[in-house]
Amino acid sequence: MPRNRSGLSNRQQAFVDIFCKSNGRLTPTECAREAGYSGKSATTAACNLRNPKYYPKVVEAIEMKQREYAEASKLDVTKHMREMARLRDMAVENGQFAAAINAEYRRGQAVGLYVDRKEVVTGSLDKMTRPELEAKLKEIREGLIVNGEYEVIEDNTTEAEIISEQ
């Protein structure tokens, strides 16, 4: 069986490349099939190729290839900023000004020019007194209705009457 520089056969190298490139989107068996192993032996081949007892060079090649992919996809600020600038320039060239503005805005966010500030204030109705609740409801009603009319309907049904109806 002819071997390449890493000591792997062409099919083994193809398996390593496909397995690492798919990054979990394909099963090992599917990777073995795509690498040229027969449908009947693909499951066994995929299992054995990932076993360091049987194929230590293949396992080592997989680990090295995964490290290469991880390093290549590593994100740093300079690389990120260049890519955002490139995308912005492409958007301007294509007349997509909204996309260009968004790319530039995101670049600004990445370096801290824009900071989203959100405050979450929680309050509990249980801790409010009845007069406080009524005042809050009145405030809400006045804020919601700009030019409209509403009618307050009083329900004088007692709790005992509600229970007896059930």
Image (spheres, helix red, strand yellow):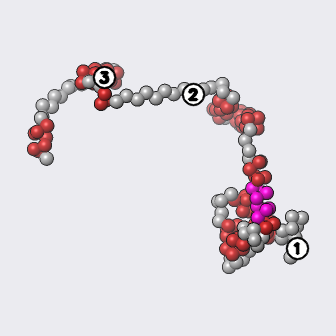
Q: Main secondary structure of the magenta part?
A: helix
Asked whether residue 33 appears in the rendered view, the answer is no
**Occupied quadrant, residue 93:** top right
Label annotation for residue 136: 3
Three-letter amino acid code at the position of disc 3: Lys
How crowded is the residue under tag 2: few (<14 C-alpha within 10 Å), some, or many (20+)? few
Which quadrant of the figure contains the N terminus?
A: bottom right
Q: Secondary structure at mark 2?
A: loop
Three-letter amino acid code at the position of disc 1: Pro
Q: Viewer-proximal residue, 163 or 36?
A: 163
Q: Magenta stretch containing residue 58, yes or no?
A: no
Residue with the mark numbered 1:
2
Q: Position of residue 123 (x, y in %)?
A: 37, 28
Residue 66 as seen in the image, left or right of residue 132: right
What span is in magenta? 59-66
**Occupied quadrant, residue 51:** bottom right
